Image (cartoon, rainbow, N blue to C red):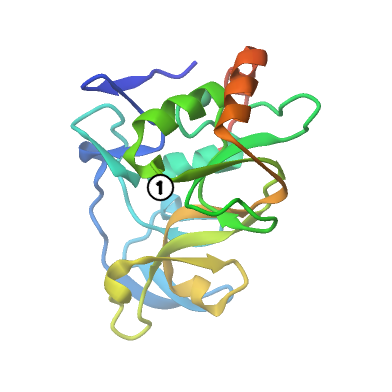
Amino acid sequence: MRQQFYWHGIHVPYITQWSSEQGDSGRLTARLGPAGERIEYAQEHQADRREGALWVRSRIGRGRGAPDFVRVHPMRQRQAILNDLCQVCGNYVPLIPDEEARLYVVGGYTPVTDGERSTSPPTHPECALEAIGACPKLSRHVTALVRETPLWGVSGALIHPKTLKPLDDGAATFQPFSAPEFNWTLASALVVALHGVTPITTADVTNLARTQPELAAVVPEGARP
Ligand SMILES: [Zn+2]
């Protein structure tokens, strides 16, 4: 089981970024890649490019400094999406028996719809209840059981091809793998499409947590970085 961190009594979610993890932004350049012109770091390392996208740089220092509850750590979010790790505790989230689905907690007002895109990794029912009660980001949230979560693209800042500066003050946009803009996106999170969606209530989540406590499980072998 992964180590858990607390800040003034609050359980800090696995994907939350800490102040020690702010990365140095490398200088960007435009070069010809396998699928046309794209942004690259002037001095690019293998770890800078994942799932075909160039990623914003960050350090690894979970638990050091102070947690920034509104920022998500790019590598841990990606790791959680690729390996079905809980966004709160970082441990593996198994399928809920009978449902063949996992629980997703998504910020927003409206119920999750089929095909909706999200950067949220899955969550254990018990962890979801804890996060809903404590996390300011989830003061408005919806919950759903989701059967399939194919990778859809990335979330990140769109970079101007000529000036190589972020557009819209670096606001994150969702870009599918197939979009021309994908080559010009500095990724900060993976995006999945949510399919086989059954919206559920917080009362349903409470019921799941009570009746199926075995849904808290260990990290599987061979988790992807
Ligand atoms: Zn958990």
The number of numbered badges drawn on the structure is 1
Of all residues shown, which one is farthest toward the bottom?
A: 162
Along the line of sight, the residue nearer the viewer: 151 or 13: 13
On the image, the x and y values in percent for residue 115 come to 68, 58
- Whether the residue carrying mark 1 lies under 8 Å from ligand 1 is answered with no
The residue positioned 28% from the left and 76% from the top of the image is: 165
User: Which residue sits at x=49%, y=73%?
Assistant: 183
Q: Label 1, on which residue?
A: 74
Q: Residue furthest right?
A: 98
In screen coordinates, is 154 left or right of 68?
A: right
Q: Quadrant of residue 132?
A: top left
Q: Is residue 159 above or below residue 123?
A: below
Q: Is residue 47 left or right of residue 194?
A: left
Q: Position of residue 216 (x, y in %)?
A: 58, 18
Q: Is residue 129 visible?
A: yes
**Residue furthest to the left:** 65
Vertical arrangement, residue 178 with respect to residue 172, above or below:
below
Q: Is residue 156 left or right of residue 206?
A: left
Please, what is the three-letter code of the amino acid marked with disc 1?
Pro
- SS type, badge 1: helix
Q: Residues within 10 Å of mark 1 (few under 14, many from 20)?
A: many
Answer above or below: position of 169 versus 9.
below
Residue visible at 59% across and 19% down in the picture: 209
Using the image as rendered, state which of residue 160 and residue 37 is in the foreground: 160
